[in-house]
Amino acid sequence: MVCSLGFFRALAAQNLEFERFQHTIGVEVWATELAKKYGINTEKAALAALTHDLAKMHSQQEQVRLAKSWNLLTYPEDLENPQVIHGRIAAYLLEQKYNITDQDILNAVKNHTLGRPGMSSLEMLIYSADLTEPSRNFPGVDKLREKLYHDLKEGTLACVEHTIDYLVVTNRTIHPLTLLTYEDLKKSVQN
């Protein structure tokens, strides 16, 4: 790895607002614990966790500008809900600026907001750890953590279902990639 975990931890500390940095450290701790449990490379999990929200150092307006200039927008819903594009921007920065070439790490960062069909174990881990890290406190989060600790794939499916339910209840758009992720995980769990 070109840059150390300490480098990325310091980068997050310097560039993210305090609450976002605290969240990032929570994701790192939880992702590392889950990685140990599921035999996933802990250094990869920690790196993806530390960098998953790296693009949040930019305003949403700047994120949209960067995503357009780097051709990272793939759905009309990306512009309707620009908060979902920061993972793609962070993955792009990791690859282009910090020479991270591990595709699994890049995918975990890129897909942590919406998921994707055929997610790797690391991708599921970061997607789910982001939602369920220790400082998250919403109704049902403990059950999601339990499911995630019992089974990574079923736990991730539960996290995606929670997200979809939340979007429905709050009358928000469900991104098509989240729906594809849900269908893929549901089929995978049933088989």
Image: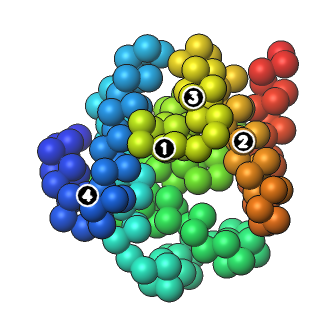
Q: How far is disc 4 from disc 1 in space, using C-alphas? A: 19 Å
Residue at 58% x, 20% y: name it: 146
Q: Earlier in the sequence, mark 4 or mark 2?
A: 4
At a point 41% along the width and 32% down the height, the residue shown is 31
- Is label 3 in a helix, a strand or a loop? helix
Residue 185 seen in this snapshot: yes
Q: What's the residue at 38%, 17% (across, down)?
A: 36
The residue at which mark 2 appears reads as 162
Q: Which residue type carries mark 3?
A: Asp
- Give the spatial CA distance, label 1 vs label 3: 9 Å
Question: What amino acid is at disc 1?
Answer: Arg
Decide: few, some or many residues near mark 1? Use Cα within 10 Å; few <14, some 14-19, many ≥20: some
Q: Which residue is mark 3?
A: 142
Q: CA distance from mark 2 to mark 1?
A: 13 Å
- Say which amino acid is labelled 2: His
Q: CA distance from mark 3 to mark 4?
A: 27 Å
